[in-house]
Amino acid sequence: MFTGIIETLGKVTQLKKEQGNLHISVQSLISPELKIDQSVAHNGVCLTVVALNQDSHTVTAIDETLQKTNLGELKVGDLMNLERCMQMNGRLDGHIVQGHVDQTAECIDLKETDGSWIFTFQYDTSKGNVTVEKGSICVNGISLTVVNSGDDTFSVAIIPYTFEHTNLQNIKPGDIVNLEFDIIGKYVAKMMGKG
C-alpha cells in the first residue's frame, strides 16, 4: 500500500522491450536503498524491482499494465514519480493508494494562477469511475484533492512544492496521466450499481 506522497523523481535511463514486457531502468536517489523484489510505485503503478545498479534500478511492466497506464509512452529521459510502499508504523499523509491504476486521463487544460497551477483532466466514464468535490484522486501516483468535479472531467490545484518535486512540472495539455480513483469511492459506486 502507498500514500500518494512522492518521495523523489527518477529519470528513465533505458527502455527494453521483451515480447509483451517493457523493462524500465530508472536512476534515482532511492535506487541505492532498494532491494530485489521490493514494490515501488512508478507514476502510481506498483512495480517490482528486478535488477539493481549503483544508482539505478529496473522494473518490468507486463502487457496488461502497458495497456492500462501511460508507461508504454515513456521515453528515455522522462521523469517518473517514485514512492516506496508505506511502512506500517508510518503516517498516512496522503490517502490509501494501492498502486493499481484504474485508467488514464488526458490533460485538457493547465492554468497558472498567482503562484499555483490548476490542471484539468478528462477521462472515460464508461469504466464506472467517478470523482467528487474535495475527494481524493491519485494522478501519476500523487495524492491530490479534487477541486472541480464534472461528468467526465476534474481539476486539481497544485502548490509550488508539489509542482517542483513531481513530474507535473512536465505535464501539458494533450499529455496522458495515470489515475487511481479513491478505493472507498470505488466500493460505494459498486454497491450503488455504478461500477
Image (spheres, helix red, strand yellow):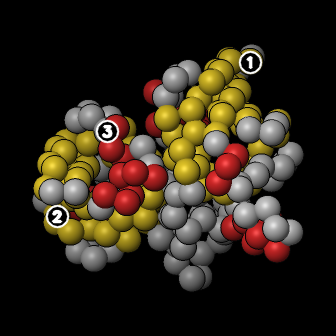
Say the numbered circle drawn on residue 113.
1
Q: Answer with the quarter of the image where residue 192 lies.
A: bottom right
| Residue at 77%, 43% in the rendered image | 146
Please provide percent x and percent y for residue 139.
Answer: 58, 46
Task: Relative to 150, say whether 117 is above or below.
Answer: above
Q: Residues within 10 Å of mark 3 (few under 14, many from 20)?
A: some
Query: In the image, 180: left or right of 195?
Result: left
Please provide percent x and percent y for residue 133.
Answer: 86, 46
Q: Residues within 10 Å of mark 2 (few under 14, many from 20)?
A: some
Q: Answer with the quarter of the image where residue 31 lies.
A: bottom left
Please report whichever mark, 1 or 2, sits nearer to the chain's N-terminal start. 2
Q: Nearer the viewer, residue 3 or 7?
A: 3
The residue at which mark 2 appears reads as 52
Q: Answer with the quarter of the image where residue 61 lies.
A: bottom left
Q: Nearer the viewer, residue 175 or 33?
A: 175
The residue at which mark 3 appears reads as 74
